[in-house]
Amino acid sequence: MKRLLIQNGLLVDTEWTRHADILVEDSKIVRIAASIDAEEVPQGTEIIHAEGLCVLPGIIDAHTHFHLVSRGTVTADSFEEGSRCAAYGGVTTVIDFADDDKKGDLASCAKERINAMQAKMAVDFSLHQGLYSYRDGLEEELSSLKKSGVKVIKMFTTYRNVGYLVEKREELKAVFSLCKKLDLLVSVHCEDDATIQKVDAEYAGPYTPPAHALLRPSEAEARGIETVGTIALELDMPLYVVHLSSKAGLQKVRELRAKGLRVIVETTPHYLFLNKGKLEGPDGALYIMTPPLRGAEDNEALQEAVLNGEIQIIATDHCSFTVEQKMAGSDCRTILPGIPGTEELLSLVYSFASNSGRIGVQQVVNLLSTAPAKAFGLYPRKGAIRVGSDADLVLFNPDFAWTISKETTHSASGYTPYEGMQVIGKPLMTYLRGRLVMGDGMYLGIEGNGLFIGQHDVGRGKTIMH
């Protein structure tokens, strides 16, 4: 039996913070106490001294796309490389994505993705299952999917051109109704396709990277949120909004909440800390993602929403392409959309929290670990430091100042969108179920060691939902 004793660290859980020791046996936390003497534990126990460090529950990146096959190519970060980025960033679980092949068997779509990830991932993972059409037999598909351990559906209010959009409102409502009946959580990429098509039809060019922000305006996001939020209200069911990007979208969330909508809102570091000025430079293509980057006013509105609790989860939407892949096109409509970000997540959000003076490390843990674990049915196995939880632990130096750059990060994309940003706080050691997967700058992950974590009770808990 493998044992690990971490002594003298500051343990940080969403519900409490205290200096304590923590004992791990095999993959689980088995004891937490003010002091556990080395003489109390069996011989051979590995002892880690964590003086001056925070011990955090493993970070959960609730929105990733590793090894995504898209537009005739594949993303730069494979399952192996994505796992490496995760481990360096203190991320021990990712929630990735399975496509809907529309062949009438969502459970098989999920199983295929799970098998592929199980073979290559070095950190744990769960799934969102894409759903792109209403069809006969959908209730049986969803029921089988639920039995497979996937209880989160991902839908889109855009991308009609590639077949992701359920166009008819009555069909969209029928999908939502089935998900409510089966207690599945619906998550939605919210951009109104009709608005985008209208803007594109009226736009005369050029289609350089800066145009991306014009062609997919924040009004489209707000209308997309209104569409799905209104349906969720009618059905009295919860909703999860992915990667909120704009002040207009935030305002629509507020209006719907005022009417009683129960909604979990996710945003990303790039919508918090980057703006559309990045699209203006010679490397503007590197900053194309969907929805697009917005203005400084949007950054400020979303930052305030994080600080006041209106946004419950920060994830990355990690979808990396190499510099060469990104720069191969000049038309913003065909430049491969997506950026890396999993590794940078914890340091960016901790720095923001620290600089704000308004939220502390406990709130960071909630935004990046506990709330996603609760939202996606992984809690308390994940997202907590408690006896019985998985020993997913991050030894984090809150005083470590460093500069994010392509030299200090590990994505196979060959760049970081946060190049040159000075941050404070850095993961020094990352443990996955009691095993060290990153320590002292060395990656120790084992391909195929990541487990699929099934979901239960998705979208529940007053601590995450307004």
Image (spheres, rainbow, N blue to C red):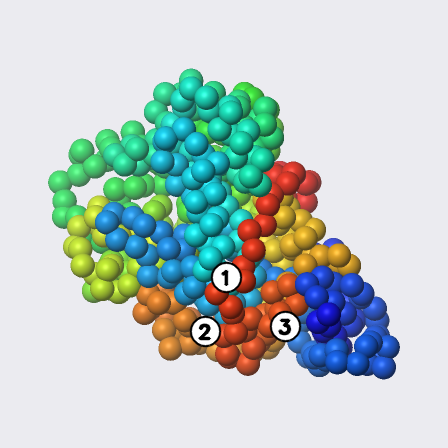
Q: Is residue 463 visible?
A: yes
Mark 3, other Cα within 10 Å: few <14 / some 14–19 / many ≥20: many
Amino acid marked by disc 3: Leu
17 sits to left or right of 251: right
Residue at the location (44% across, 47% down)?
113
Q: What x and y, as percent, mark residue 166?
A: 37, 27
Residue receiving disc 1: 448
Q: Closer to the camera: disc 2 or disc 1?
A: 1
Q: Which of the two discs, 2 and 1, labels the residue nearer the N terminus?
A: 2
Q: Is residue 239 above or below residue 60?
A: above
Q: Position of residue 399 (x, y in %)?
A: 59, 77
Q: Which residue is mark 2?
A: 422
Residue 69 badge = none
Q: Is residue 51 visible?
A: no
Mark positioned earlier in the residue sequence (2 or 3): 3
Q: Nearer the viewer, residue 326 or 230?
A: 326
Q: Secondary structure at mark 3?
A: strand
Q: Amino acid at mark 2?
A: Gln
Q: Amino acid at mark 1?
A: Gly
Marks 2, 3: nearer the viewer: 3
Residue drawn where x is 55% and y is 39% of the image = 148
Which mark is nearer the camera, 3 or 1? 1
Graded by Cα atoms within 10 Å as few (under 14), some (14 to 19) or many (20 or more), the crowding at tag 2 reads some
Residue at the spot of label 3? 395
Residue 245: x %, y % from top left: 42, 47
Image height of 308 relative to 174, above or below? below
Query: Which residue is found at the position 61% from the left and 62% from the top?
Result: 58
Point out residue 36 in the picture as x, y percentages from the top left corner.
Answer: 83, 75
Earlier in the chain: of badge 3 and badge 1, it is: 3
34 horizontally vs 166: left or right? right
Q: Quadrant of the N terminus?
A: bottom right
Q: Secondary structure at mark 1?
A: loop
